[in-house]
Image (cartoon, grey):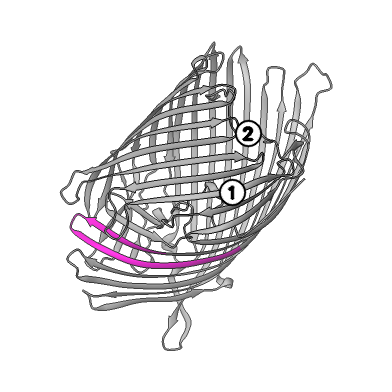
Amino acid sequence: MGVIAGKNNINLSKGINSLPDTDTSNGYIESDFVGANYTKGKWNETSVNGNYRYSAQDRDFENISHKETFLPDLNYITDSKSSSFSDSDSHTAGADLKFIIKPKSTSSNKKVRLSNKTDFKSSNQESGGSVKSESYYDNGDLVSDYSSNSESTSSSSEFKNEFSVTPVLNNKADYLNISLGTDFSKTDSDSQKYSKNILVNSDKTVIQDQINTTYSNSSNSSDISFNAFWSKELFTNFRLMPRYKATVITTKSEKYIYDFDDASEEYNDFNELLSSDSKYVTTTLRPALKLRYQYKELRFEVEGAYTNTYRDYEDELVTARDFKADFDYLTYSGRVRYRDENGYKNISLEYDQNVDLPSVGQLQPVENVSNITHVIVGNPLLKPGISHNARFQYQNNLAYNNINISGNLRAQFIKDKIINSTITDADLNRYTTYSNIDGDYSYTGNVAVSKSYFNRKTNINLNARFNANYKNSLSIQNDVKFTAKTTVLKPSFSFSYSYDNKVDVTTTYSYSQNKSIYDTDAFNDNSYFVQNLDINSNVFFLKNSFLSNRVSYRYNSRVGDEFDGDAVFLNAGLGVELWDNKATLSVVAYDMLGKNNGYRRSVTETYIQDVENKILEQYFMLTFVYKFGSFAGQKMNVQGKNRSGGGRSRGGSRRN
């Protein structure tokens, strides 16, 4: 049995290993949690597991952004400020029961495993936010002055259960697995939203002021699935593996929106276009068959599947949203794998397909005007997008020389890719629909080499890696079709050293060169690089004391004029292990140099955006961790005094 609790984690869940950058310190986050777990029995015997967790979290976010948008016939700039908050609490509980019926004869492998897993979650949330933005042409003329405020409360509950039966049929390890899963959920919410957009060129103001209440905004859904899988050896080393899956998902939703009426000064003007009273049913049937043949160190696999997905959407308020769609498609895959008898060398060649079905909103030919600056209309003629993927993987662990070599190549070709087709008018209002397009493809690859040196007290590891990516992507903006060819080259190197469980140092450097070329003069080609240097060190002294440091340097060659291109972050911690390593007391300092700037840059084919987030700056924290009890029959403080240090490690990995 185990108990865990925490308070005021302040958004750095990994402790000293969390650098104070935009990935780990976006906004202010405070959390409290408490949980308990009970486990009896090991994984390969009859067992029971139960758990409960309560958590509460308060989040506050703020950011400012500068976005330059490039369109074939229009360029504009948007400066905005936004803030938001979210206060939530949740209760999560689960139970997992496994019962194994063993054979009467000890010489038989026949057995039956019955399992049932149940999960329940209940949560409440209150949130809100505000946005203030100004958009202007690249010559400085103001076009749009937009502002919005919103707030909402919601409550949700979910109950999931999965029951499965797995009998092993004979001594050849043939088995059958049958499972039934259910997932029921309910959500109630109410919200209020006010937005205003002042259009300078048109000399008009567009206002949206509306609410929906708890009694008129609710959603109930159910997901029932059936799975069956049979693995049968027909003759030596040849295995037949049929599979069948059936899923029925039903969602009932009511959303009634009321606009503010100036005459009565009340929210009583029913907005039929944004309201809905709908029922949506999706049924999916998927039979599949896989064949596997093992010849010495070679394994051959082929699989084919037929999938039928039927969708039925009905809305009592706006019948134009109604649609019925039936998607039928065949997919197939294949794999050839070589693995030597020791598992040191692995080579595989694979091919498979993925199907991207259009969503409800992408199919409905009705305007979605919930955002007064962006109108979206679906396309009922959309076809599923199909991606063809080919992969080659190589891994060789030269154990005698302590060298590991690995690499992979991947090619992807997409047919009928679903894309957004957007038109932006002179007032910078956007109108989006969806289209299928051909011509997207990409190539990726990487190669890595590592070498280890070690003796009784010392361990040294060198690693070099090179990643490359090329992507040819098509887009449609303002009725102009264009292609972006993007290349990313990224070499990286790492060095680690440890000595006698007293010193542990790891250094990593990476350099990423990014370049995008467009086939139209409407866009400027762009090129930039990003480099990172990380140094992690741990020094152990006075038997049970330790000093930890983590330093990170980051440089972006193409940033906005108002932002720094480089930043240095430093975390440090001083601690002591107590009571035979069962407890740890430490003092941790975050961002000791005070250089955290919360900066992030995004670059796409149509815009460059700089964002600076409200961040948690320099602070100090006292932490105490105590480990007690056992988990699944194993002691929780298994690390003991073997922190890192020398000794031989087996590198590489095995992949089935």
Q: Residue at x 44, y 42 (%)?
A: 534
Q: Which residues are magenta?
A: 63-88
Q: Nearer the viewer, residue 33 or 52?
A: 33
Residue 106 falls left or right of residue 382: right
Q: Nearer the viewer, residue 451 or 179?
A: 451
Q: Residue at x 31, y 52 (%)?
A: 565
Q: Residue at x 46, y 88 (%)?
A: 264
Q: Nearer the viewer, residue 619 or 272?
A: 619
Q: What residue is shown with label 1? A: 574
Q: Position of residue 535 (x, y in %)?
A: 46, 41
Marked residue nearer the N-terminal end (1 or 2): 2
Residue 191 falls left or right of residue 474: right
Q: Is residue 640 visible?
A: yes
Mark closer to the observer (1, 2): 1
Q: Position of residue 231 (x, y in %)?
A: 62, 24
Q: Nearer the viewer, residue 216 or 400?
A: 400
Residue 271 lies in the magenta-colored region: no
Quarter-of-image position of residue 489: top left
Quadrant of the image containing the C terminus? top right
Q: Residue at x 27, y 50 (%)?
A: 558
Q: What residue is shown with label 2? A: 228
**Is 608 situated above or below 406?**
below
The amino acid on which the numbered mark 1 sits, given as a three-letter code, is Leu
